[in-house]
Image (tube, grey):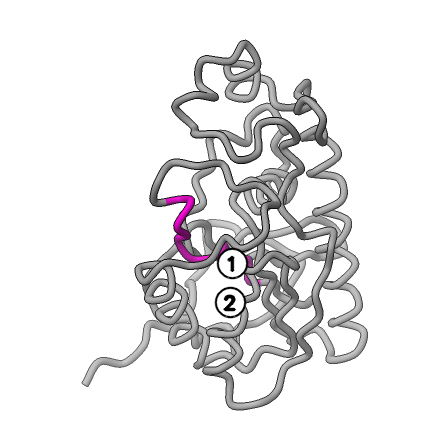
Amino acid sequence: MATVILVRHGRTTANATGLLAGRAVGVSLDQIGRDQAALTGDRLAAVPVVGVVSSPLERCQQTAQLILDRQAGTPYAPVDLDLTECDYGQWQGRTLSDLATEDLWPVVQSQPSAVVFPGGESMAAMQARSVAAIRRHDAAFEAEYGPGAVWVAVSHGDIIKSILADALGMHLDLFQRINVGPASVSIVRYGASRPTVYATNTDAGDLSWLTNSVNSDDAPVGGGAGHTAPRTK
């Protein structure tokens, strides 16, 4: 089975000011965000990825480029509209502190499956399109490059949380229990019987084990031996 590395974009000017950017154009990484994305690119440099699929929004494409710049090869690098940010409708461009006073806010927190943003998208539709996109790309990369293929999807916080919730077998109403920080790395493998989540929300650590790990649909009883730790000098 192939392996997908889910990467959230680095911190943006909107993140830093508590603004819900949504699909607004011109929202870029700030200096901290560029540094975060560069660090993620450095972590992934040890892994020869076959593709880097990105949301079309600028902050994700900037993050994807910083990953691509550190790859020895030239991975396939398409843009996928289905990995774009949730359409927050009339919530877009407002501050989170202001949105917290809305009647819909507690529903977003406790029952996201029932949420339809005014003038925008439902959170259920957001999850359905993003999960379908990830599974579609994963199957295509495995078919072309084999079960050892590793690829990257660069997207947004709520998108990645919804993908992880699906992989973990969690109802969408529980997805707010998952945290996905800027430029964080989460790792999922989709097998014939079920997905396996190898990591969530990591911002440090060696990833070279992905190049030679053993693929299996079976979960190791007792937890297994894990991957080999990197040697220290």
**Residue pictured at 55% horizontal, 49% vertical:** 156
Residue 31 point in image, percent of width and height: 32, 62
Residue 122 point in image, percent of width and height: 71, 28
**Residue pictured at 53% horizontal, 78% vertical:** 68
* Placement of the C terminus among the 4 image quadrants: bottom left
* Placement of the N terminus among the 4 image quadrants: bottom right
Numbered badge on residue 62: 2
Q: Amino acid at mark 1?
A: Arg
189, above or below 48, in the image: above
115, above or below 7, in the image: above
Q: Which residues are magenta?
A: 5-15
Residue with the mark numbered 1: 59
Q: Quadrant of residue 214?
A: bottom right
Query: Dot 1, crowdedness within 10 Å: few (<14), some or many (≥20)?
Result: many
- SS class, disc 2: helix
81, above or below 116, in the image: below
Query: Dot 2, crowdedness within 10 Å: few (<14), some or many (≥20)?
Result: many
**Residue pictured at 77% horizontal, 49% vertical:** 132
Between 76 and 44, which is closer to the camera in this rendering?
Answer: 76
